[in-house]
Structure formats: structure tokens, C-alpha cells
Image (tube, helix red, strand yellow):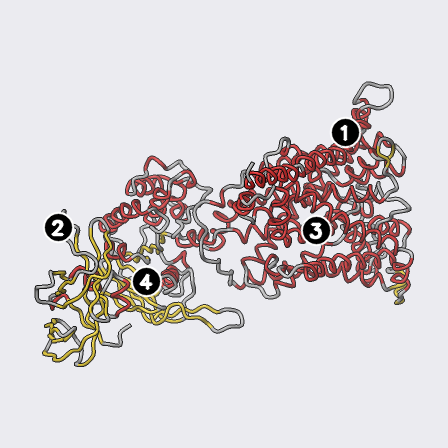
Amino acid sequence: MTHVEANAAAAGEEGIGRNLVLPVLYPLLALLILVFVAYPMFVLFGRAVVEGSGPPFTLVWKVAADPYNRKVFWNTLLLGAIVAVLGTLLATAYAYAMTRVSIPGKKVWHFFAMLPTISPPILMALGLILLYGRRGIVTYGLFGIQTTGLYGLYGLVIAQLMSYFPFAYLLMLNLFRGLDASMEEAAGTLGANAWQALRTVSLPLLLPGLAGSVLLLFGYSFADLGNPMLLGGDFPVLSAQIYQTIIGMYDVPQGAALAIFLLAPSVLMFVAHKRLSSRMSYATVGAKGSSRLRLVMYLPARIAALVLVGIVTLAICLQYATILAGAFTQLFGINYTPTLRHVIATFTKSRGAILDTFALGVISAIVSVGLGLVIAHLVARTRHFGRGLVDFVANTPLAIPGTVIGLAFALAFSGSPLLLTGTAAIIIVAFVVRALPYGIRSGVAALDQIHRSLDEASMTMGATSGQTLWRVLLPLVRPALLAGMVFAFTRSVTTLSAVIFVVSPHWSLVTPTILSQMDRGDVGEAAALSVVVVLMVLAVIHGVPRLFDRDWREVHQE
Amino acid sequence: MSNRTAKSLRVQSLNKSYGIKGGPRIPAVIDFSLDVAPGEFVTLLGPSGCGKTTALRVLAGLEDIDSGEVLLDGRSIARLPPHRRRIGMVFQNYALFPHMSVFENVAYSLRLRRAAEVDVKRDVGDALDVVGLADFSNRLPGQLSGGQQQRVAVARALVMKPDLLLFDEPLSNLDAKLRVQVRSELRRLQRALGTTSLFVTHDQEEAMSLSDRIAVMRAGRVEQIGAPSEIYARPATLFVAGFIGKVNALPGTVVSTNGGRATAECFGHRFDISGAAVTRGDALLLVRPETVLLQPPERTGIAGIVSEIEYLGDRTEYRVRVGETTVAAVRPSLGQEASFTEGARVSLAFAGDSIHLLPAGSV
């Protein structure tokens, strides 16, 4: 054997050794996903379907036949439908005003519209109660009315609109920006005025996006737990009903059966949404127009747009201002003496919850984005067996309301073979599973930015796919991954539904703490803790990129 | 669907600039004036960024005018919104509505006018007949080829019987062969309909083949307006000469002028040049490569050495060094004709009436 041949052989062996990384890593990954995503859902189904000595589905039928449960189910659908339709209208109008009408102060309007996306939805209920509740500063303080009108359908609609319309706004904003300007220009030269061009050309092109927004909001409304628990009143909905059944009545099988009825419509929505977005093909005919659209200068339109964004922003600001005020007053609604008592209590009594939330949020953000990247790489860049299935299962949490996931986790890991109840692990896993689809998305987005030839070049120079991932791709995708981590962190620390069944005395979290403070009537502490969690998220969103990434500005122009 | 009453267009001192936040305004079109006769086909020609598309968009009403006047058939339209100008436009990317069938795309302007269904059917049918797409009316734009999409866009603009047709580089997204074919179709169509048309392109060949007149633009200004042959033969500036075809700009001196004639000296030879409006002194002699005669060295002419030969199939391009200057010459490739080799000594000649004189400082 010549010298050269020996070298080649050695290199070959080395290559095989390194190549083992991925074949070992991927089965492990698949196993993790099966255990932590698929298995809990099977356990949940099992508890709902097979119960006691009766034939399967006895309980499910019994739950479905119960008139009260039926009412709760229809309530949930009604609330979801109202929020979905109103929210989409509001989001579309807001996005139109922001992208197409000449109005001042767009940065301000955008900032406040985005604020609810980084806050726990439960904050909306809290703010509404302080403003318009029985002792609300507006209803009672201003008008002297002691009303419970807030509690029920109307209050829920308003709270959920404020909590979730920003997500739809973000969706519509990107769609409006993506519209080819020459479409409306062509309509103009053909004799259409601005309104006709919008109605006959732009809105039909946006139709799939509008439907997507409706389904998105429907899903959010379904999954919401905090607002229904605080504002539901005599309008019970499924998520709160599940919680009451499990925590209040200790009836796990019944709760599991109810969870199936929450899950089914959510999955339907999700499937519909998926099919819809895969058919959103219109907008890409021909080359992109070079010109940007002119802003609407028509004065009445500008005034109307300004009034719209102004009112929405005012309503949102009022919420946050009230919560801030509530954090610094003795007992909002009764005793308005200023105090630091609640803030101090937050940093003493609730310190554990804040620190736990932060630590577990950071850990799960890193884990979910890391896993997401590996899965994205598996799906987009390799041909490993079963990659499609791994991708599908890892993405299913998108379709599952938080309450259902949380309950499934609590049931699946409360005993052998995997006892996790009471540990930090169960919270981290719940966070990670919920954030994983977004982790995958940011991974796919990051990898998409990199031309395939880069990894091919790396491979031709003798790198294994693992080495290529580590040495070539990872440095390039870092900004996108950081953004993904920030998003995962935000989502984790603001969720209530997914964690309410898995928190324990050892590991408490901020959102369930706020809920119990509200239950006890500690409005001040709840407000103070809310302020802290919003500030924490804001600090992470603005701090992390500045600390860790020079290229942040390039990636996030907005 | 011929347009019996073609309209005239008059643009007077049009100015348009863009503002950048916190910066100075950048002029895009400067003092642009143009008269287009009824039924005439005029092309705005220039390199990218010269303001030709901006000028077109201002005329369509898609951009606001800073100052100036636009008269269509004597009526001011400068401040009208696009939908009230009766100006049809064919966009560079065609801008077909992807959610509407070919028929509905073409019918769009008629429907906005609430035309009767019979009229819509007839007019759309006529327009699609004209562009040869009658069988495609139920297709969606996404199911058509680029050339077909382009024709739908033309039909859509024609069906409203516009007073003026604007074309914003409508051929640039087609492949080279198709471009030539669609080009001649477009010309035939415009001639037949007689609609006053303004066409924007950066392709000089396109401009020459389509237009009655060409306006060459550069850095926001119109450099020269004239018939294609006039612009080619008598470019007003060196820029125009170089943008439309290749040209040799040879340094020389005008030694005498007499009415429309001038005598200029170049490489020690005297040339009698007609139709020149220059004064005595230094000048540039513009000579198109195809008018340069390449002869064996023993003939009378300017002595030079062949420095480079480029064989292009139908023709061969030569570069000949004459002192410090390089002169380009083109000869058609005619069979087995003996040609010159690199390094060969040659004699150059050109006729005085193929020379165009420009002042020495022309750029």
C-alpha cells in the first residue's frame, strides 16, 4: 500500500466514524418526540376512552350527551367564531391603515399593537376587571355603576380580541406588504378608484390570508384559559370547564373526555389552515413589481385610519396603564393610596416564581430551538427514513390547545414508567413541546437562507453532514436562531394553559401565580407581578439580540 | 376596434423628484417636454435609472407630478387620478390579476363602467381576437406562457379604447426570440389601431424597430428626440451616438465652414462633410463602424494596423490601431472572401457624408 492510499483509507474510516453522529442522533430525536409528544396524547385518549368496566367510549358519549356540556361546547364555538371574525376585521383594518394610509406615528401604533403578543393573555382580563369590573375605575369610579356586565360573553370577546388580534394583525401586515404594487396600479389605469381596486383586486388576493387569520384566531380563542377563568361568569367555555373538572372536582376521566371535545375542533381548524396555506399560490404570478404603493392621501380615509388605530392603541394603553397603577396602589377599586407594598411582595413572595419562570424559559428556549434546527436540517437537507413523520409529530402541538397538552402531560408523567410530576423537567418539556414547531420554523427559515451549494461545497471538501451543520451552517443561521429563542421564551413565559396542570410547590411559574393571586383578591400583587413579567419579556426581546448578535438590525428591520 | 379619433399628447416641462427621509430630494425627471402627434408611436429610450419609467408613471398618474403640464387632446390631466385619465398601461410584469380568468382580466375596465353584458362579451372577444388569444379566455393567468400573458395585458389595455397607451418595458420578461416576434406584432397592432402610444425601453434595437420617433433620455433629461434614422445618423451628443449602436469618435479639427458644409481634418486627411452646424476648431468626427472601409495597405487612406478581430457569424468586427486611436470597422461575412489577419497593415477610408460632426467637448 502506498503512502497516498494509506492516507485515503484513514480518511475514509474517520469519515465513517463521524457519520455515525447523525444516524444515532436522529433515532434518539425521534424517540424523544414520540415519548414527549405522541405518548401523552395517547394516554389522554386512553383515559377518556377506556374507563372503568364499561365498553370503550361510554364516558365520551355520556359527556357528549350532557346538556350542560353541550352548552359549554356551543359557547366555546360561539366565542371562537365572534373573536375570529371581529378580530380578523379589526386586524385587516389596522394592517391596512398601517401599510397603505398616510398617518403619522406608525411606530407608536405598531409598538402598542404588538404589546399584547408578549404579555400573558390573562393580563387582559386583569386590566378589564380593574377598568370595567364591579369596582372598575371607569364603570364604578367614573360612572358609579356597580355592574357585572363585564363577566360573560362580552367581556370574553373584548379580552380575547385584545389578546389575540395582534397575531392576526401581524399576519395581515405581512400580507399587505407582500402585495404586488402593480396589481392596484393596473386596476387604477383600467378605471378603478382606490376603493374599487381594494375591493376587486387586493382583498380577493388576500382572501386566503383572511381565512387563515380567522382560523388562527379561532384556535387562540379555543386555547385561552386565563380569560375564561377570570371573566367567564355565566358563560362557561371548554378550557375553563376542563380545569374546573380536574382541579375542582378531581374528575380526571371526565376532564380527559372534555379535552377530546376541545381538541377535535382545534385539529379541524388546524388541518383547514394547513390546506389553505398550501393553496395560497396566487400572489406569485409574474415577476414582482418594482414600485412601492402610494399611500392613501384622501383626508377622510386618513382621519378614519387614525381614529381606528388611535382607539385601539388607547384601549391597549389603558389596560397597561391601569395594571401599572394597580401595582402601586393599596387596593385598586377601593383604596387608591399609593404603595410599594405589592412590588416588594413581588420580589419577596413571588421571587421564586419569577426566577423559575426565567430559568425554565431560557432553558426550554435553547432546547426547543436546538431541537428545531436539527429537525429542520433532517427534513430539509437529508433523506433519513421517517423524517416526514418526525416533522409531522413535532408540529402537532400547533394544533393542540395548551390546556389539552398540559393535561396530557400531567396524566402521562404522573407515574411509571416516567414520573416527572413535581419536577422542573415536566415544565421544561411542556415548554419545549409547545415551542418546538416554532423552533422548527425558525430552523427551516434559517436553513432556507443558505444556498444548498454551501453544504455541497462543504461535503465535497470531505466534511460529514454533522460537521457541515456545525462549522458552516450554524454560524450563518445564528441570527435567525436567536430570534427563534426569543420567540420561544416569550411564548413559554406567557402561557398559562399549558403549565397550569404541571406546576408544583417546588417549581412555580408566574402566570399560575397571577391567577391564584387574582382568585385570592390580591389584585395589587397580581398587577405588580404582571408588570414584572412584561418587563422581563421586553428586556429579553430587546436585550438578547443586542448582547449576542451584531447582525440583529439586518435581520429585524421591523 | 380601430381608434378613429387618435389623441395628441403634449408634455410641458415635467419635473419629478423623490425625497428620502432626512436627505435631499433626488430629481428623477428634469424639464421633460414631449409632443406626440395623434396615432404616433414614441419610445423613451435610455439606460436604467434615466427617468424613463418615472416619466411614464407620472403620465399614467401613478406618481404625483412636481411641476409641469400634461395635456391629452388639449385637456390637462396632470392632476387627475389614474382611473380618470383614460390611459391604458401595459406593465413590465404585466400585472394580470391572478385570481381572474383571462376573460375577466380583459373585461375588468368594462365591468367597472358597468357595461352591458352583451357589450362586454363582444368587446372582450374582439380584444382577445386581436391578440390571438380567443381560445384562452377561461384560463387563469398562471396557466399562460410569458408571451401569452403579455398579450392579455395588451388586450386588457386596448379594450378600454384608451386615449393613450403606455408600455413599460413590456418585452423585457420575454426570451430573445419571442421578444422579436412580439415586437413586430405589437407594431402591426399599433399601426392598425392607430392609438397614440408611448413605449419605454432600454433596448435600442427595440426602440428603432417600433417607433415613429425616439426620445433618448439620460439622467432625467431628454437628450434628443427624433426619427430612428435621424437619431442614428445625426446624434446630438456622444452619449446618444454611443447608446444607439456603436460609433467611432475620432478627434479632428474643422478647418473651414461654408453654409451647411464643413471641411474637417482627421489623421492628416481632409473630409468634406455635409449638414454640419459646427464652428471652426476642434471637433469629434463620428463614424459608424459599418461605414468604415477596410482596404489593402497599398490603397489611399488612413494607414493602420489590425489589432483585434472578432468573428460574429454574419459579420466580422475589426479593431484597427491608427496612432494612439483605435478605430472599429465592421464587414459583413461574405462567403470565402479573403480577410485581414491580426497584425496586418490596412488602409482605412470613409466617405465625407457618412461622418457626423460634434463639438469637441460633447459627452
Asked if marks 2 and 3 fall on the same chain, the answer is: no
Q: B109 above or below A295?
A: above
**Label 2's element?**
loop
Q: CA distance from mark 1 to mark 3?
A: 29 Å
Q: Which mark is residue A42?
A: 1
Quarter holding residue A222: top right
Question: Residue B337, which numbered label?
Answer: 2
Q: Residues within 10 Å of mark 1 (few under 14, many from 20)?
A: few
Name the chain under label 2.
B
Would you say A189 lies left or right of B199 here? right
Disc 1 with disc 3 on a shared chain: yes
Sequence-first tag of 1 and 3: 1
Q: Which label lies toward us, 4 or 3?
A: 3
Give B92 or A20, whichever is nearer the viewer: A20
What crowding class fits label 4: few (fewer than 14 Cα within 10 Å), some (14-19), or many (20 or more)?
many
Q: CA distance from mark 4 to mark 3?
A: 49 Å
Q: Amino acid at mark 4?
A: Gly
Q: Are marks 1 and 2 in contact (CB under 8 Å)?
A: no
Q: Please tell me which residue lies in front, A472 or A400.
A: A472
Chain to which the residue tagged by mark 4 belongs: B
Question: In this figure, which residue is indicated by the disc labeled 4?
Answer: B46
Amino acid on which disc 3 is placed: Met
Mark drawn on residue A485 = 3
Amino acid type of the residue tagged 1 in the rendering: Phe
Marks 1 and 4, how far apart at CA: 68 Å
